[in-house]
Amino acid sequence: MNVLVTGGAGFLGSYIVAALASSGHEAFAYDIAPPGPDALNVAPALASRIRIGQIGDLARLFDVCASERIETIVHSAGIVGLETSLQQPLATYQTNVMGMVNVCEVARQTRMRRVVFMSSNAAYHKGPNDRLYETDPAFSPSNGNPAGHYGTSKMASEAIGLAYASFQDLDFLSLRITAIYGFGMRSPMYIKPMVENAVLGWPTRFETGGPMKRDYTHVLDCGEAVVAALGAPRWTAGEQRVLNIAAGQARTASEVAQAVRNVLPGADIEIGDRLTPLEEENVKMRAPLDIGAAKRLLNWSPKWSLEAGIAEYAESFRRSLSQS
Ligand SMILES: NC(=O)c1ccc[n+]([C@@H]2O[C@H](COP(=O)([O-])OP(=O)(O)OC[C@H]3O[C@@H](n4cnc5c(N)ncnc54)[C@H](O)[C@@H]3O)[C@@H](O)[C@H]2O)c1
């Protein structure tokens, strides 16, 4: 199948391109920026498969889809993260929300097979349980989303995709992913400096952050989830279209530090046991994600334990150093 991966030159996008290529799909990337060395390392095919374009440029998106005979879009482009979204609310909504509308419009008008949206745990509001279920509230009548404009843009994008699915027969699936880690990651989430400094033999010091928890998910598991989402039969009306993709277990940054020490003996990591005010707010919605629906509907489960994932990350990082 010919697949366009928006944001395909990014961290996750490059792994999606690689996973699709190795499962027999013809993957193209659509991105505002060309792939950097890490993305090319992950997916060498990007060198010839990148199509530069703004997600806001509807005409360009139509052109690329027509010239590459695109049948499905995996929508991974976006402005990512709570802090960035608080600095740039307008750009976050224009890129993330209007980007979603443009992707759905192109898919609808050209009768594509499916749109798979890379959503986020940030779409959730504070869940009532110790685990996040897809049926938990994504909206509160009294408080803003704990992940700021970023989370709000993800929640709104899902609602847009669902409206296209319900009223215009668009086969839309949303994968709520969370804390993706592995070689090439951009957002540090504590784990990046811990692993990379350990490989380099450097110390890592954080004054705060020890209790910050995340459901850390290895990027290769995420790529496999996208392949499963493309391979699944057409969704029927009324069927659940939003699926959690995660390891299913939340780990604190202190626990991650211990896992890195276990995998990479000699790792010199110290982390304080307080949270920043922003983390105090954000940690409240950092419960593990329930992954029962993804298993049932996509036959997908994560394969990488945190320790095995850290070892893979360290090995890929080491290999990239030896090549540079
Ligand atoms: N990394 C994570 O932990 C994580 C967790 C949950 C959800 N996600 C979602 O996964 C997706 C990919 O995240 P990532 O970590 O790979 O981030 P990333 O920043 O590495 O990738 C995003 C890509 O989108 C591109 N992009 C940004 N604005 C664009 C525009 N206007 N037009 C075209 N392309 C544009 C960027 O150039 C970049 O290559 C995002 O939608 C993000 O919200 C990521």
Image (cartoon, rainbow, N blue to C red):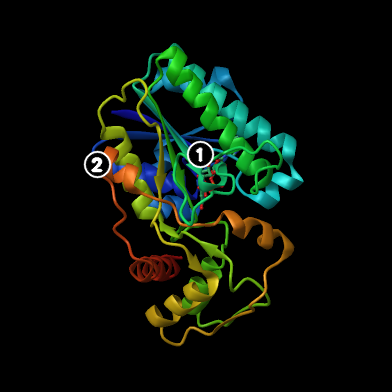
Task: Please give the residue where the numbered disc 1 appears in the rendered image.
Answer: 7
Q: Which residue is drawn at 41% across and 61% down?
A: 249
Percent x, y for residue 30?
49, 33
Residue 306 relative to residue 141: left or right: left
Percent x, y for residue 72?
37, 26
Q: What residue type is labelled 1?
A: Gly
- Determine whether the beta carbon of the residue marked 2 sits less than 8 angstroms from the nearest atom of ligand 1: no
Q: Residue 62: tell me if it is visible.
A: no
- Determine whether the beta carbon of the residue marked 1 sits less than 8 angstroms from the nearest atom of ligand 1: yes
Whole-number angstrom distance, CA of label 2 to CA of label 1: 20 Å
The single residue placed furthest to the bottom in the displayed view is 266
Q: Which amino acid does label 2 sit on?
A: Ser
* Between 287 and 16, the one nearer to me in the picture: 287
Percent x, y for residue 115?
41, 27
Percent x, y for residue 296?
27, 42
The quarter of the picture where residue 193 lies is bottom right
Q: Which residue is drawn at 70% across and 36% down?
A: 91
At mark 2, the secondary structure is: loop
Residue 144 relative to residue 55: left or right: right
Task: Please give the residue where the numbered disc 2 appears in the rendered image.
Answer: 23
Q: Quadrant of ligand 1?
A: top right
Going from the N terminus, do you reach mark 2 or mark 1 first? 1
Residue 244 relative to residue 272: left or right: left
Residue 66's place in the image compared with 246, above or below, is above
Residue 307's place in the image compared with 13, above or below, is below
Q: Which residue is drawn at 32% across and 36% down?
A: 229
The quarter of the picture where residue 134 lies is top left
* Between 317 and 311, the one nearer to me in the picture: 311
